[in-house]
Amino acid sequence: MGRRDPQVLRKLAGFHTGWYSISSRPFYLCKMVQNEISRSRGRPRNYDPDVALARATDAFWSTGFSGTSLDRLCEATDMNRPSLYLAFGDKRALYLAALGKYIEQSSQAIAAALDYEVTLAVALTQLYEFTLTVYLPKAANARGCFMISTAVPEATNDDEIRSLLRAAVAEFDRLVCARLLHARQIGELPAASDPATLASIATAVVHTLAIRARAGESRKALMAIVAAAVTMICGPASAAARTKPRAVR
């Protein structure tokens, strides 16, 4: 199985909402007037939607969905409210766009880290080291995982966010399980091992890294957890034989 090309996690695609088309001429004319008013009040569309959504994501990442005001989002994106609404919809639509794109890009990056061309121990180490580059950025405060930090608190009362969260966790488990199944097929794991259960353990380690990173634990402490997890999943001999993982770009 070939390795997928890595995707840049933080490069988020734009999201736009549009007017609904109604055949009634009076309604159509009314919407034309409203559009003209909105355009005159809002900033012209000379912004970069990728940049605006990335900045909004950073704002949500810092203070969560509920704690991030529209004023804060306007400041972060350098857009006024009419422009923000025209570009992304309301605050919830903007958050869902950010969450959906984060999940999409994360899945692609995780698939790249779980390289089938290296040993399982190296692949898992690459996965964990990649997540730590996101959770502990060098140029910013420790922030953990965007999905865990922002979606988990909202999932209790928002069915759509809960569905996105559940689907993302299931997809993460599926990617890791497929990689572990391959490792068992080529003899890296015992024939009696259970890839599904091991995948749940492997992804649970990612979740605890996210929480501990957000809580302020050091990279050294987190890498000790990584080493122990790789040894537990792969076995002492396989973990000890691993070489330095290649960089995931």
Image (spheres, rainbow, N blue to C red):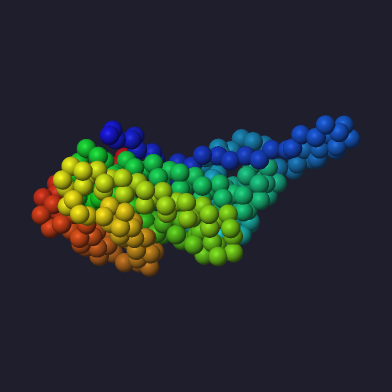
Image quadrant in which the C terminus is located: top left
Q: Position of residue 148 (x, y in %)?
A: 44, 59
* Quarter holding residue 117: top left
* Quarter holding residue 66: bottom right
> Is residue 49 rendered to the left or right of residue 42?
left
Residue drawn at x 81%, y 37% as measured from the top left: 31
Image quadrant in which the N terminus is located: top left
Residue drawn at x 28%, y 33% as measured from the top left: 2
* Quarter holding residue 9: top left
Residue drawn at x 10%, y 54% as measured from the top left: 237
Q: Position of residue 126 (x, y in %)?
A: 26, 48
Residue drawn at x 53%, y 54% as measured from the top left: 163
Q: Is residue 82 above or below residue 206?
A: above
Q: Position of residue 243 (x, y in %)?
A: 14, 46
- Is residue 132 visible to us here? no
Q: Position of residue 222 (x, y in %)?
A: 27, 62
Q: Is residue 149 above or below residue 51?
A: below
